[in-house]
Amino acid sequence: METDPRDDLLKLENQLCFAIVTAARNVVSIYRPVLEPLGLTHPQYLVMLALWEQSPRSLGELADELAMEPATLSPLVKRLEAQGRVTRRRRAQDERVLEIALTADGRALRERALAVPAQVMEIVGMDAAQLGALRDGLAPFAGGRARS
């Protein structure tokens, strides 16, 4: 009995989605021990990265930047607030908008976080140019969020 050549298209090992999901899980596990001394989870680190670029931001702006739903982001921000890293306040000119801002502790944490990229590069055995090329190669799957 002959096998259909299209059968290979349905093998798990040939699926782009499986490779990306597996890689994402592995990347997060690489970051976990690096971020632990900072008291951050990987999603919290992403929030802090966005706020180190621009603070304050509305919850909606932050959710858009991070490609997250506001309902998913809100508990992360609450935990960062409980840690003293951010504040959450309603905008005076529009009470519907929840504004997220860094605290002094949140700004100070940036200095310690400067070591994170080098630690990750050492763990994965790639330099900044190699990681940049990999990131840029994923841009079509990230909705154009990858940057150089």
Image (spheres, rainbow, N blue to C red):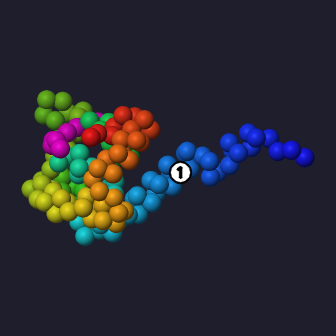
Residue on which the image places disc 1: 19
29 to the left or right of 104: right
Q: Position of residue 41 (x, y in %)?
A: 32, 60
Magenta stretch? 53-60
Is residue 93 among the parts visible in the rendering?
yes
Position of residue 40 measured from the top left corner of the image (x, y, whole percent)? 28, 62
- Measured along the vertical axis of the image, is residue 75 above or below residue 39? above
What residue lies at 13% left-to-right and 60% top-to-bottom?
111
Residue type at the position of mark 1: Ala
| Residue that protrudes farthest toward the left in the picture | 104
The x, y position of residue 12, in whole percent, is 64, 51
Q: Is residue 142 left or right of residue 108?
A: right
Residue nearest the viewer, comparing 10 with 98: 10
Quarter of the image holding residue 28? bottom left
The residue furthest right is 1
Name the secondary structure under disc 1: helix
**Residue at screen point 40% across, 41% down:** 137
Does residue 30 sit above or below 100 in this rendering? below
User: Residue 108 sits in which quadrant?
Assistant: bottom left
